[in-house]
Image (tube, rainbow, N blue to C red):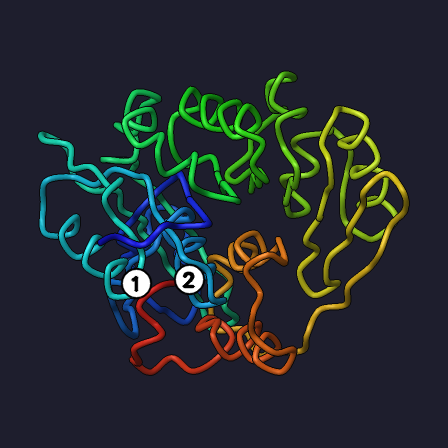
Amino acid sequence: MAMQANVVVVGSLNMDLVTRAERLPVAGETLAGESFGTVPGGKGANQAVAAARLGAQVAMIGCVGQDAYGDQLRQALLGEGIDCQGVDTAAGVSSGVALIVVDASSQNAIVIVAGGNGQLLPASVQRFDALLQAAKVIICQLEVPQATVAYTLARGRALGKTVILNPAPASGPLPADWFAAIDYLVPNESEASALTGLPVNDLHSAQAAATRLLAMGVGKVIVTLGAQGALFADGQGYRHFPAAVVQPLDTTQPVTPLSAGLPPRWRRASRRTRRSHSVSKLPHCRSRGPARNRRFLT
């Protein structure tokens, strides 16, 4: 009998094709790389894995292509104990891929091909409405069609669930009718700036952006600020959380585990265990060597 998931992630699955080089190439330039690897990823899948590793029972609703990458992405999620009944396979398209180059300072350049992610339509989510009904928390991002995100947010609100949106990638304001459906909005600096039209580069400007987002109707806002940590705002006040000091190896998905680890309902581990998960379970903050917990760029 399948488990009943208390967290449902509706979103993307990508196979990340990761190359390391001394520096990022400029236009028209060919560089010799240092290494290459394929790593299951995608913002949605990464959030699902992060939540599962924090102790949640997780289900994924997404779409892969009818190819080897699709099989590998599904198997990787199953290996993390994630319910994949909601992961469809679309014929005639590739699975989503992200082409990533990481330089010696851990900066990166990324090109994403949506593939199967672009086939995740509202009707696909409707087919797995039982998963949404059983969940306590629903998490979304912006790597699938906007109509699908809009439907999921509205359905989550109608069901009375805790709804989390990581608005990435964001290139401009969100539709105005989305905000009232979002309990937690978790943008980084550039995303907060795109959503509000305000420059965001420090705590003061992050507070101004969070204030504007709250005025738009969001329940709570967490602006992630890289090395400066994160700012929480809920309409009652603001709280700054300093960042842990780590040696970054890859900055591809630093905000994803935060989005997945927000609501306290599934945090049954001790404080010490949670602290361990927050750093040691994040591969981009640890070693480059292959290990079981490096299958995702979480």
State the image coordinates of residue 213 (x, y, percent, origin top left): 75, 31
- Around disc 2, counting alpha carbons within 10 Å, would you say few (fewer than 14), some (14 to 19), or many (20 or more)? many
Asked if the residues shown at circle 2 and circle 1 are in contact, with their CB atoms under 8 angstroms apart, the answer is yes
Residue located beneath label 2 in the image = 52
User: Where's the N terminus, which quadrant?
Assistant: bottom left
Which of the 4 quarters of the picture holds residue 298? bottom left
Q: Residue at x 27, y 73 (%)?
A: 35
Q: Position of residue 60 (x, y in %)?
A: 34, 46
Q: Which quadrant of the view contains residue 78?
A: bottom left
For label 2, the SS is helix
* Position above or below: 22 against 59: below
The answer to whether residue 192 is above or below residue 244 is above
Name the residue beneath numbered marker 1.
Answer: 81
Q: Earlier in the sequence, mark 2 or mark 1?
A: 2
Three-letter residue code for mark 2: Ala
Q: CA distance from mark 2 to mark 1?
A: 7 Å
Residue at point 71%, 31% (across, down):
218
Residue at position x 40%, y 46% in the image: 44
Q: Nearer the viewer, residue 221 or 163?
A: 163
> Is residue 150 or residue 285 the one in the foreground?
150
Q: Secondary structure at mark 1?
A: loop
Please tell me whether residue 241 is drawn above or below residue 27 in the rendered image: below
